[in-house]
Image (spheres, rainbow, N blue to C red):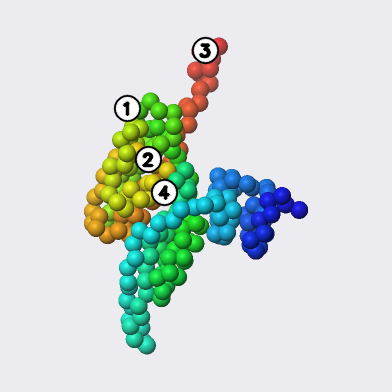
C-alpha cells in the first residue's frame, strides 16, 4: 500500500504516470516532468504541487454562427503557478464564465513547466534563484516578448500581464521588452509563457571533448 494516500480525495489515476505517483515511485513534479510520460491528469499536479495559485488574465466573449443560429461562448486565459519555479498556461472556452475558468485551470495544470531560475545578470552577485539564468524570447501571433535577467532589487520591469505570468513562475527581477500588438492580452500572456518554456528547453553547451591528438600532447 502506498504511503502517500493519494486516493483519500477520491482520485483514481488512469495513466501510467498517475499510478507511479500514487505508488510513490515519483514524488516530485520535476521527476514527473523528466519521466518522459505524458501529463494527462490535473489531479496529479494537485498532489505534487499543492496550493497552486491561479490568475485569470483575460475573459472575452466569442461568437460563432451555426446552422441553428449564433452561439456565444466565453474564452478565459489563465495562468497557474507555485511562485517557486513552476508555471502553466491555457485558454478555456465554455457557455458559462465559471466553467470556462475551471476548464482553463485544468488545462493549464497539464501544461506545467519548470522554469530555470538563477542569477543570470552580470550585474548580480546573488546566490538566490530570483531571476532567469539567461535571456529568452517567446512569440505568439504578432507579439514577441523578451525576458532579460536582472540583478536582485530591480523588480519586474514589465506590463501587468507579463508581470503576472512572471510572478507566478517565481521570477522576481527581470527586464522585459514587448513588440507587436501588445494590447491583445491573450497573445501577450502566451508569448510570455512561451519565453519561459523556451528557457526551460534550452541547454547549456556541452563541454568540448578532448581530441585524441590533444590527449597525446598532454600525456
* Distance between the alpha carbons at the discs numbered 1 and 4: 24 Å
Sequence-wise, the earlier of marks 3 and 1 is: 1
Describe the element under mark 3 as helix, strand or loop. Answer: helix
> What residue is drawn where x is 63% and y is 46%?
27
Q: Position of residue 140 (x, y in %)?
A: 32, 55
Residue on which the image places disc 1: 123
Q: Most extreme residue toward the bottom, as rendered?
A: 68
Q: Is residue 68 above or below residue 122?
A: below
Describe the element under mark 2 as helix, strand or loop. Answer: loop
Describe the element under mark 4 as helix, strand or loop. Answer: helix
Residue mark closest to the camera, 1 vs 4: 4
Residue on which the image places disc 3: 218
* Contact between labelled residues 2 and 1, with CB atoms less than 8 Å apart: no
Residue on which the image places disc 2: 172
Sequence-wise, the earlier of marks 1 and 2 is: 1
Residue on which the image places disc 4: 168
Q: How crowded is the residue under tag 1: few (<14 C-alpha within 10 Å), some, or many (20+)?
A: few
Tell whether 59 sits left or right of 105: left
Amino acid at each position: 500500500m502506498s504511503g502517500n494516500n493519494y486516493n483519500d480525495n477520491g482520485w483514481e489515476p488512469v495513466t501510467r504516470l498517475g499510478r507511479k505517483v500514487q505508488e510513490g515511485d515519483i514524488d516530485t513534479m520535476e521527476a514527473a516532468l523528466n519521466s518522459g510520460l505524458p501529463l494527462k491528469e490535473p489531479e496529479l499536479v494537485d498532489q505534487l504541487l499543492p496550493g497552486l495559485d491561479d490568475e485569470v488574465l483575460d475573459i472575452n466573449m466569442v461568437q460563432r454562427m451555426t446552422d441553428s443560429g449564433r452561439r456565444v461562448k466565453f474564452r478565459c486565459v489563465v495562468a497557474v503557478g507555485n511562485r517557486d519555479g513552476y508555471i502553466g498556461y491555457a485558454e478555456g472556452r465554455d457557455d458559462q464564465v465559471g466553467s470556462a475558468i475551471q476548464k482553463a485551470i485544468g488545462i493549464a495544470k497539464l501544461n506545467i513547466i519548470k522554469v530555470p531560475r538563477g542569477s543570470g545578470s552580470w550585474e548580480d552577485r546573488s546566490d538566490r534563484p530570483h531571476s532567469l539564468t539567461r535571456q529568452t524570447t517567446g512569440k505568439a501571433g504578432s507579439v514577441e516578448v523578451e525576458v532579460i535577467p536582472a540583478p536582485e532589487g530591480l523588480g519586474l520591469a514589465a506590463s501587468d500581464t507579463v508581470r503576472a505570468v512572471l510572478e507566478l513562475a517565481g521570477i522576481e527581477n527581470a527586464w522585459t521588452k514587448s513588440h507587436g500588438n501588445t494590447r491583445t492580452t491573450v497573445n501577450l500572456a502566451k508569448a510570455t509563457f512561451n519565453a519561459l518554456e523556451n528557457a526551460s528547453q534550452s541547454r547549456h553547451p556541452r563541454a568540448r571533448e578532448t581530441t585524441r591528438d590533444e590527449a597525446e600532447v598532454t600525456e
